[in-house]
Image (cartoon, grey):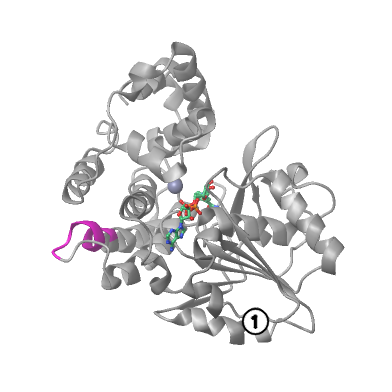
Amino acid sequence: MEHKNFKNIEKVCYGRGSFSMMEQILAERRNGGFFLFVVDHFFKGKELEKRLPAAAGDLVHFIDVDPHEPTTEQIDALRDETMQAKGIPAGVIGIGGGSIMDIAKAVSLMFTNDGSSTQYQGLNLIQKPGIYHLGVPTISGTGAEVSMTAVLTGPEKKLGLKCDWTVFNQVILDPELIASVPRERWFYTGMDTYIHCIESENGSLNNAFSHAYAEQSLKLCRDIFLGDEAGQTAANDDKLMVASLMGGLSLTYSEVGVCHALSYGLSKILHEKHCYANCVAFQHLEDYYPEGVKEFKTMLQKHDIKLPQGLSKAWSDETITKMAQVAFNLTHMWRHAIGEDWQTKLTLEDIEALFRRM
Ligand code: NAD
Ligand code: ZN
């Protein structure tokens, strides 16, 4: 059996107000050079902009991540522009959600690897370690703060730059930064963590190590979304940041499953956002995750979140087949969720039927 051997984040700074530690953390890394900050444009003109520890000569880019998910073209352009203006930075700092963190991870690798980021979409294709990179999540759930991938959409594929060097050198987890996340986004993104744990737990790759992280992350999710004090409170934000990180670690040492396979189909073909697509799919997976889906529905109710029903009525047979093919090709997820012999238990038509439930 092949054992997973993953690199974790080198340093983690956690706690309310820990954002202020950045100046000190960066001072040790500056070496007379400059830093490149990539920041979610939500923070433009907000208080956080004034708190950025950017010195004269540092470059600060505010990026709107809503028009599209990070692209290879965007990463190459950011790298080329920076190199032309000032050379290679001492480090890259990403402040935002999964999109911004992936931009920071990817560009840090592209300062030292020649050519276009399209050449490196896949596992261990990157040739050299990137430059120092620091991540600051401002919305919690995807686990992008801890994962070894930077997901990019290229001309041919949507696939991560995945290797040990992708992982952040440092993250700063300051729960104050997620307070402003709109309620529905908070719910969908938080549910990504919940689903990571349910899928990691229910499959052949689950083990004591991944289980320990999932168990704790699930406990936190239940407090946040179901407990007596459920909701978007400061105390729950403290927990959600930790839950996201632990959920990410759990799936790293196990695997995601049926929901993520279907969700990738929705994202690839219909361009639905990852966390929302997961929720759309998960509500119909009671055959695979009976307890998880039941609990998920209670959470939906508690937070008065209404997911769309009957979406598939508007989808052509061709669209459904395309989405099912994307899902079917994620063989590692099915193997984990259903077993080595999954192909004898599940056909493309069965996956199409799951999409037709949506
Ligand atoms: P995101 O980065 O796409 O941001 C979603 C929205 O939230 C944006 O409108 C943003 O402006 C807003 N936002 C962020 N922080 C906010 C705050 N504090 N207050 C108010 N608004 C705020 O969100 P995401 O769901 O974290 O990331 C999705 C992206 O992550 C996708 O591109 C997906 O491909 C990628 N992803 C990566 C991994 C990984 O392991 N690398 C895993 C899952 C998803
Ligand atoms: Zn996910």
Q: Give the residue number, with chain letter if any, for mark 1.
A: 26
Q: In this view, does 347 lie above or below 300?
A: above
Q: Position of residue 237 (x, y in %)?
A: 33, 68
Left or right for 289, reference 115: left
Q: Give the range drawn in magenta.
A: 221-228
**Could you say whether the residue bearing mark 1 is in a helix, strand or loop?**
helix
Q: Main secondary structure of the magenta part?
A: helix
Q: Where is residue 167 in the image (x, y as percent from the top left)?
A: 61, 62
> Can see residue 344?
yes
The picture quadrant where one finds residue 166 is: bottom right
What is the residue that sits farthest to the front in this orientation?
45
Q: Nearer the viewer, residue 93 or 47?
A: 47
Mark count: 1
Q: Nearer the viewer, residue 258 or 93?
A: 93
Is 224 magenta? The answer is yes
Q: Where is residue 50 in the image (x, y as percent from the top left)?
A: 55, 78
